[in-house]
Amino acid sequence: MFRFEKEQSVWDFNGTKIGGQPGEYPTVLGASIFYNKHEIVKNDHTGEIDKETAEALWNRCLELTDITGIPFFIQIIAEFGEAFESYFDWFTSIDNKTAFLMDSSAPAALAHATRYVTEVGIADRAIYNSINGSISQENIDALANSDVDAAIVLAFNPGDPSVAGRQKVLNEGGVAGQTKSMLQIAEEAGIKRPILDTAATPLGIGSGGAYREILACKAIHGYPTGGAYHNMTVSWTWLKRWKGSKKNPSKLAETLQGKDKYVAQLLHHYQGGMDGVIQAAWSAPDIGCNLIASALGADLIMFGPIENVEPMITAQAYADITILEAARDLGIEVLSEEHPIFKLV
């Protein structure tokens, strides 16, 4: 492992600390909820949800934090301002502490969310996701006029996925129609707690640069850094074909159906029949892509659907323990009493 010469910033979100040298603090996991086609969402415009199930999902995250020491942010996704209001009201009614990411592909909804959290007094827990090359002036103004001071700052360069290209987005600007750099926009918008996102890109289109950018961001800027590396798995065309669907079974499923003895052995080990076998094959890279980022010093792993918390948190706890053990040889000591090394070893 390694330590960075650059002094590393640490942001404190109501006791959840993110950043620092590898090993000093547990990695923060970002769990997505109310995402597209999430079955607990009854109306994605108004934000009507199955509150009982949503609360059970979040409570399971908190239970696992108590067990492992790995903390969470919740990543709240919406495409309409009204839905954001409903989701925020629900979350703050069951949790008065944890930070939440405001995530949307709809700029107007995200601007609305920024204004709303300021109006209701929860902006100190809000993390804007994200300041990127397509951010509109409306959203910049909404941030500047709000109490939100934390944001994901995305190092995505559609024309150059190399580390140099990603750093150009952060430091120089002139990319994707923006004359200013992402960090300059963040500063002018009042962001005092930036979290750098290395912009996970599909395999074959610069995915390696997203990992190397972790080292660059922490070495150059010293800010907490991470990303949604599971997007690499989601966008992996070959894996999607291999996984298949119930209507279009994968080649794996077709092959196994003809080998009765082998199928019987597999089904003995996996619940859910053939679906369980395929899901296991999908889950391995979906979790593994995040562990690569952890080994390179990522502070925030946005791992996708909240339902995936069980395999993700155990894998992350394992990674955090081994990283700390290695970092101690470099003079780095843990600064959190809740680190997994105190709970699981």
Image (spheres, rainbow, N blue to C red):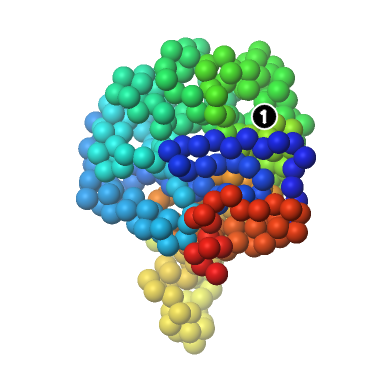
Q: Quadrant of the N terminus?
A: bottom right
Residue 285 appears in the figure: no
User: Number of numbered discs present?
Assistant: 1
Residue 179 position (above or below residue 96): above
Q: Quadrant of the C terminus?
A: bottom right
Q: Indicate the amino acid at tag 1.
A: Asn
How many neighbours does mark 1 have within 10 angstroms: few (below 14), some (14-19), or many (20 or more)?
many
Q: Residue at x 69, y 17 (%)?
A: 174
Query: Viewer-proximal residue, 66 or 242?
Result: 66
Query: Viewer-proximal residue, 330 or 269?
Result: 330
Residue 119 percent across, percent down from the top left: 31, 19
Mark 1 residue element: loop
Residue 252 position (above or below residue 140): below
Residue 59 percent across, percent down from the top left: 32, 53
Q: Residue at x 43, y 69 (%)?
A: 276
Residue 269 appears in the figure: yes
Residue 47 position (above or below residue 301): above
Residue 76 percent across, percent down from the top left: 38, 38
Q: Would you name the residue on which mark 1 appears?
A: 157
Q: Residue at x 54, y 35 (%)?
A: 11
